[in-house]
Image: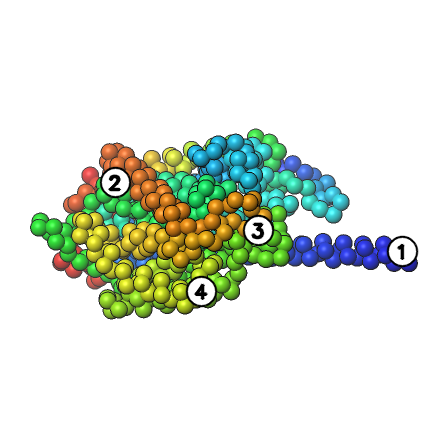
Amino acid sequence: MEDQILALTAELAAVKSAAQVTNTMFAEAYYYLTIPLMVIIHAGFLLYEMGQTRVKNVLSSGIKNLLAFAFTIITFYLFGWWFYWALPTFPVTSLVAGAGYMEISGLAYASAIALPWGDSAQYMGPNMADHASGVFWGAFALFAATTASIASGALIERIQTVGFVICAIVLGSFAWVVAAAWGWHADGWLVTEFGFHDFGAAGLVHAVAGFFALGILVNLGPRVGKFNADGSANKISGHNLPLTVTGLMLIIVGFFGFLMACIILPGEGWSWYSDAGTTIYGTPMTLSALAFNVCLAASGGIIGAWVFTKDPFWMMSGCLAGIISVASGLDVYFGSHVIIISIVAGMILKPCADWVEGLGIDDAVGAVTVHGTIGLFGVVVLGVFGSGIPGLGAYAPEGTVAISLFGQIVGAVVMFLLGFVPGYIVSWLVNKAGMLRIPDDVQIRGLDAVKVPAQAYPESMVSTESDSK
Amino acid sequence: MGYFAESFAELHADGAWIDMGMYIGSGSSMPGWYTVIASVMLVAILVKGNNDEQDHYK
């Protein structure tokens, strides 16, 4: 009898061990697969941006976008990842390890796991005992690259390549990372002090990137020929709207991976629960909730934009806007609620973009509006409807601050500042170095002819006479 | 330089892998130097890229 109990105990331990291995491998594969899905976002941005460019500048726009992707990912490895773990409690409490109640933040913690040198290098490369660091880093690196791609489109046809890359590095490996540390980490002070909630990163990715682009645009100025002497704006059409619209649809495909990566799977060292997935805040979340709400939001945004524009470019931008408008609360919205919010987001999109243009800002793809304005709209709307929802999971200490309109407005202001101020400052410095704006005569000749040793289309396909202005 | 173990058996004890970096240079200062070299390369590439770009605009 005793032997049988011992044998059964050993067998149970083996089964539990095997189950844990399966869980760990599944979790690793789950996050790993979000990475190529998010690469699709960049394929989408590449098509979107090149389609919105005139023939004479197509390849130059593509090069800029590709370099932003590459440099952002590498610099996120070199220092961006460290900022995310170091800064959650700064400047409200201190940078010492354990300042947050989860005890996964602070200088010492970040330096132990997120630097590519010294002892922490063991978690920044191959390690058979660590199935989490690389896939989490990969997902975050693609979030970082997404911010750079968002800003990239707004600046096409007149920003210098290296000047833009420097701005992209600051955005992708610092500005949005600070926002994520403060508002997308269980120790983040926006979360613990104000109950800030942004499940799908409407504020900390989209709004930060959108307003970072605005900060650059102020210093960069418009494309040659965009505005007339009386201040009225001319429409500069891209050379391939089908490419742009297809690119936007690919971005939506990638968003499913992006949002999937926002879920914390159960049963691992980093998990909140052993039996259920959660948001990054430890609050309830499932892939099923995402399936309902993302599909509905995408559809609502298309319909809302169609009401006033009838334009496929704005309809697909509305599709993005619909998802962004509910991204903060994808974990707590009911499907029909999502439909209402996303339709409204689609409807206000074009008027908001027209207003920005009326200020003399030449945002070539509407990124400031789609990502910036709608991102903040989404953050604040959650405060309107979601006040009172607990801000952290069941294991959070008593007295955890709940979601509130005030907290969401504070978060929205912080996200605006974390985007606009660094964007303005770094582009001002780059401009002072003579590396920001492409000379007007080069813009008129076309960037590809001047600096790209390749040709996008057959010689017979050139910009029209009006494009040369 | 080189790999730090002669056999993977010594890295797999009691049914589990040892928690350590398993790459060339692990446990030495080499990863840090690789990081320094990579960083310098990136900066140099940006400087050269900018010089080339400014030449195009002249």
Nearer to us in this view, B55 or A332: A332
**Disc 2 on helix, strand or loop?**
loop
Q: Amino acid at mark 1?
A: Asp
**Residue lying farthest to the left in this orientation:** A230
What residue is at 72 percent from the left and 55 percent from the top? A16
Residue A400 at what x, y percent from top left? 51, 45
Helix, strand or loop status at disc 3: loop
CA neighbours of label 4 inside 10 A, class few (<14), some (14 to 19), many (20+): few
Q: Disc 4 or 1, which lies upstream in sequence?
A: 1
Q: On residue A293, which mark appears?
A: none
Identify the residue position indicated by label 1 in the image: A3
Task: Give the labeled residue for mark 4.
Answer: A334
Cα distance, mark 2 to mark 4?
A: 45 Å
Q: Tell me which residue sits at (62%, 33%) in the image.
A: B27
Q: CA–CA distance between discs 4 and 1?
A: 54 Å
Instruction: Name which residue type carries label 3.
Output: Ala
Report which residue position mark 3 lands on: A394
Q: Quadrant of residue A76?
A: top left
Residue A436: assigned label: 2
| Disc 1 + disc 3, Cβ < 8 Å | no
Question: Considering the image in quadrants, where does the N terminus of chain A appear?
Answer: bottom right
Q: Disc 2 residue type?
A: Leu
- Judged by depth in the image, the label closer to the viewer, 4 or 1, is 4
Q: Give how far apart the Cα atoms at labels 1 and 2 are.
A: 77 Å
Please, which chain is the residue tagged with disc 2 on?
A
Mark 1 or 2, closer to the camera: 1
Q: What is the tally of numbered marks visible in this picture? A: 4
Does the image show residue B3?
Answer: yes
